[in-house]
Amino acid sequence: MTVRGFAPLTGIRMDPGYFHFDERSEFDASLVADVLRGRRFGVIFRDVIPVATQKELCARFWASPALKRRTGEPSYYVGAYHWNKPIGTYLAETAEVADDVMDVLDVADSPWYLFRDELASELAGLGATLRLAEMDGAQACPALIRAWNKEGAYSLEPHEDEAQCRDPRQAGFEVQRVPDFEVCAVNMCVEHEEGGRLVLWNIRPDDDSRRRLGIEHTGFSYPAELLDGIEEFRVDVRPGDVYIFNGRHVHAVDATSGNRTAVSFLMGFADARTVVTWT
Ligand SMILES: [Fe+2]
């Protein structure tokens, strides 16, 4: 893609003390709460999903009657995503698929339940609750389980997760209040063959940059050429890892071979006492 005519990306760059990942070998919900509160950029918990759980979750994913292929993308998924669509469509798709999503997640030692239980306890200590985002009594999808296998330098193009919270077709959806706080991405890796590192750039693009690129309400995608020269780092991801980071920063997944399957959702404070999750 040519970027002639596009001005350099502008936005917020965080200081080096913030722009790094912490790495732990045991899950610690207090670090997740730090990411939610903007006190920490990201953390990866290594090898915290038992192998038998990874395998069972994966088997259920690939055998799910709700397995779909994302239109125009080499990506398989179970679940629904709100990105770039009217809120009514997302909530209707979610209602249809939520039971199938829970069938995939409801395995022994499920990372989805463990993560949420421990985070809910941690947040309770801070006077906050954790729940699915809602609108008019309908709930957001509990998780999106997906496998990316697109070829090229990036199997998932550089993007950020904040712009999608401002889609005017989703006015009134609770996630529209999350950009007042932090927009955080959660991923739980259950299958990973080769490559597919998480790439993070030290920039939170502003609306001027989004408008110039025509991605004001999608945040997808940022041409790689515009990211040249911006500080970045890459994180190796392996099956069993759980990671969370501030999705305001541009991020991507680099070249992957084979399946890279993860349970994912977004989350953030919708108000000082409520953390919501959605997909
Ligand atoms: Fe993302």
Image (tube, rainbow, N blue to C red):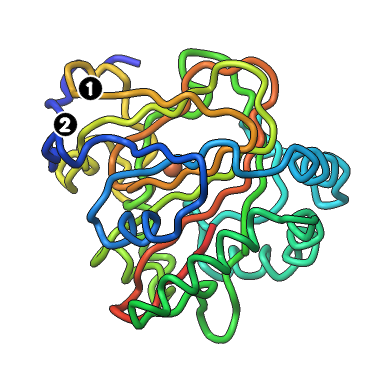
Q: Which amino acid does label 2 sit on?
A: Leu
Q: Looking at the figure, which quarter contains the C terminus? A: bottom right
Q: Name the residue under label 2.
A: 9
Quadrant location of residue 142?
Answer: bottom right
For the point 68% across and 38% down, the residue is: 190
Along the viewing direction, whichever of 182 and 81 lies nearer the viewer: 182
Viewer-proximal residue among 1 and 20 = 20
Disc 1, disc 2: CB below 8 Å?
yes
Element assignment for label 2: loop
Q: Give whichever of discs 1 and 2 has the lower sequence position.
A: 2
Q: Dot 1 surroundings within 10 Å: few (below 14), some, or many (20 or more)?
A: some
Answer with the quarter of the image where residue 62 lies. Answer: top right
Q: Residue 226 carries which label?
A: 1
Could you tell me residue 27's position as x and y percent?
A: 51, 51
What residue sits 66% from the left and 69% below the top? Answer: 92
Judge by depth and name the residue closer to the eye, 161 or 29: 29
Confirm if mark 1 falls within 8 A of ligand 1: no
Q: In which quarter of the image is ligand 1?
A: top left
Q: Residue at x 33, y 36 (%)?
A: 21
**Disc 1 residue type (three-letter):** Leu
Inter-mark Cα distance, 1 to 2: 6 Å
Q: Which of 144 and 195 is in front in this view?
A: 195
The picture places residue 199, in percent across and down from the top left corner, at: 38, 27
- Residue 38 lies, in percent from the top left, at 24, 56
